[in-house]
Image (cartoon, grey):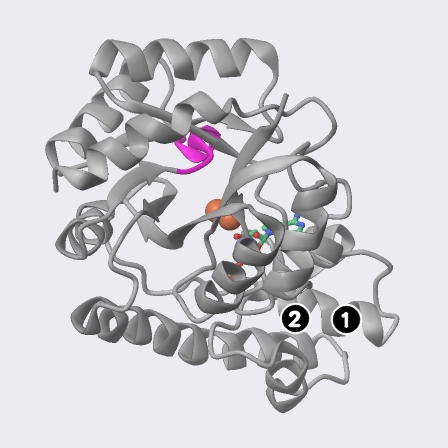
Amino acid sequence: MSRIDLHLHTTHSDGSLRPSEVLTLAKAANVSALAITDHDITTGIPEAMAAGQEFDIEVIPGVEISSFDGQSELHILGYCLNWQDEAFNRQLATLRASRHRRNPLIIERLRAAGLDVTYEEVKSLAGTESVGRPHIARLLMQKKYVTSAKEAFDRYLAEGKPAYVARELPTPEEAIGWIREAKGVAVLAHPTWVKATGEGLRTCVTALKEAGLGGVEVHYSTHNKTQTAAYLELAQRLGLLVTGGSDFHGITKPDIEVGYGRGDLKVNPRLLDPLKEASAHL
Ligand code: AMP
Ligand code: ZN
Ligand code: FE
Ligand code: FE
């Protein structure tokens, strides 16, 4: 039986493989449909669609937008959207600009910690406008300051570590609104990032639904069975769509494979039609 994977990053944001390379891995993993969900950018979609035609894999246009609700950093996925929409892409450009304001501050802190790195090097390694901390992690790996991206985050880049700098982020309501205006279905990514639990989690997701959220990423690489069951129950209770994906990034998350996550991820192709159906009604 085939599988789908609705959360994948490429070199157009902080993934380490090109869209066509991600599609090659998807073909090998028997993935019948996938979504490219690069952070704050849609430029990887045409190459993915061309490779999709070649490999007979359905490619759903997607995006992932980071937001902050005052307590948690929430990532909102957008699916089946008019990815060429001008207003939407102008909005994404402002988000990429906020990355370029933050990243040099991170570099300053790394230099203050004695590391010989420049933002020019990061931008040249990234080769895209959507530059993120994983690119900085890769530079630290190349320069042998760390042996893995995890070590780069654990020692320098994660929240609370010496080189952490917060980014100006939109609210989840704003991110959902932009996706909806581009006729996309907005989905809450990796819901474990919601710091509230129990009743607080329900209240949070209910508010997002009122703002136009259409689904929850129930199936995710790091979810255990208990978490998957709890998010499934939450989605069903609130009448939200169920989605799933690996959050593949290539070298910065080496334990995550396209279609399989850490090995036990399996997203059922039957989840795709309800998503497409929902987008058709927007
Ligand atoms: P940014 O968008 O620049 O804030 O970077 C956040 C991204 O870094 C997330 O979307 C993840 O893909 C990645 N990330 C966060 N923590 C880690 C980690 N410990 N190891 C590798 N990648 C991470
Ligand atoms: Zn990422
Ligand atoms: Fe994310
Ligand atoms: Fe992601």
| Picture coordinates of residue 37, whole percent (x, y) | 46, 53
Q: Is mark 2 within 8 Å of ligand 1?
A: yes
Task: Determine whether label 1 and label 2 are within 8 Å by CB.
Answer: yes
Residue highlighted by disc 1: 140
Write the residue at 25% across / 22% down: 240
Q: Amino acid at mark 1?
A: Leu
Work out which quarter of the rendered image holds the C terminus and state it.
Answer: top left
Q: CA distance from mark 1 to mark 2?
A: 6 Å
Q: Amino acid at mark 2?
A: Ile
Which of the 4 image quadrants contains residue 247?
Answer: top right
| Picture coordinates of residue 24, whole percent (x, y) | 70, 53
Q: Is residue 169 visible?
A: yes
Write the residue at 43% across / 62% down: 166
Work out whether 16 lies above or below 244: below
Circle 1 packing at 10 Å, graded few (<14), some (14-19), many (20+), is many
| Picture coordinates of residue 20, whole percent (x, y) | 63, 62
Write the residue at 71% across / 48% down: 25
Work out whether 188 lies above or below 184: above
Front residue (pair 101, 254): 254
Residue highlighted by disc 2: 136
Helix, strand or loop at label 2? It is helix
Which of the 4 image quadrants contains residue 194?
Answer: top left
Helix, strand or loop at label 1? It is helix
